[in-house]
Amino acid sequence: MEPQMDEKRDIELTEMRKSVEKHGSTAEGYSDTTLMRFLIARSMDEDKAAKMFVQWRKWRTAMVPNGSIPESEVPDELEARKIYLQGLSQGKYPVMIVLTRNHFPAKDQIQFKKFVVYLLDKTIASGFKGTEIGNEKLIGILDLQNISYKNVDARALITGFQFLQAYYPERLYKCYLLHMPWFFVSVWRLVSRFLEKATLEKIVIVSNDNEERAFIREVGEDVLPEEYGGKAKLVAIQDFQLTPPSEDGPASSL
């Protein structure tokens, strides 16, 4: 059974590579793992996956011409200290925490979009730390504790999730929403309209003790900060030190 599955997978990948060329691009230099993420995101339809891949390449070339977003291009967003990287979860997924109380709607939308790319790229790259190799997917934690109306930014949430859907296919493992206040329910309902079914299925709103225990168990006490029932300290994304990637490291599979 397994050899047949491998053969089917190879055929699908070959067809997708051909389809990419038909759309005037090339998949040369990209791993099967990378291409498979696009195939899965498009229900194994080679042509749809190829179109998504070609669009992603064009977007990546325009948005990240040098391969990565330098911190010097997102100073205002970094200064807010609202994104934290915590290492790998129990299942070896890189864990990112968003402190929404430190976020305010951006005056510079271009800088904000670059910041979304910066934080997603660095979170994915943080899955490759030393000899520990993480999964290609990430866990996001959206902490809504102590937010006020000034912090509410549906546009930012929609941008973040749409980037994940369109340009980071099959990168989200789970997204946990913690401490959701009553007034945010209508905001989340609005944001949800822009999310694909596959994305919505990965979002967990933690609203009782049992769900909180499951959340702590899944992420792990060693990487969860003390504020969330763990043993770790919060580490701001700009303070998180990445291990330089190897030839097969995260930079080649973004």
Image: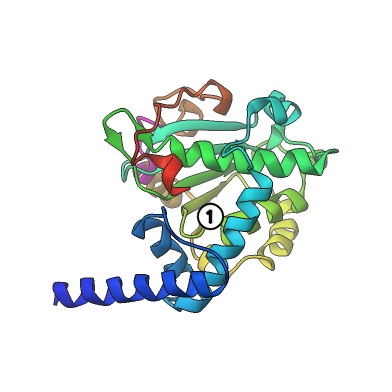
Q: Position of residue 212 (x, y in %)?
A: 45, 46
Give the residue drawn at x 57%, y 72%: 23
Task: Please tell me which residue is depicted at 69% across the width and 58% down the height of the picture.
Answer: 188
Instruction: Indicate the colouring scheme.
Output: rainbow
Residue 217, placed above or below residue 131: below
Q: Quadrant of the N terminus?
A: bottom left
| Residue 137 relative to residue 115: left or right | left
Residue occupying image coordinates x 45% and y 31%: 86
Asked if residue 220 is among those painted magenta in the image, a careful observer would answer yes
Q: Which residue is mark 1?
A: 168
Q: Residues within 10 Å of mark 1 (few under 14, many from 20)?
A: many
Is residue 73 in view?
yes
Q: Is residue 248 above or below residue 76?
A: below
Res. 149 image quadrant: top right
Q: Quadrant of residue 7?
A: bottom left
Q: Which amino acid type is marked by label 1?
A: Tyr
Task: Provide the residue span drawn in magenta.
Answer: 217-223
Q: Would you place residue 11 above or below residue 79 in this image?
A: below
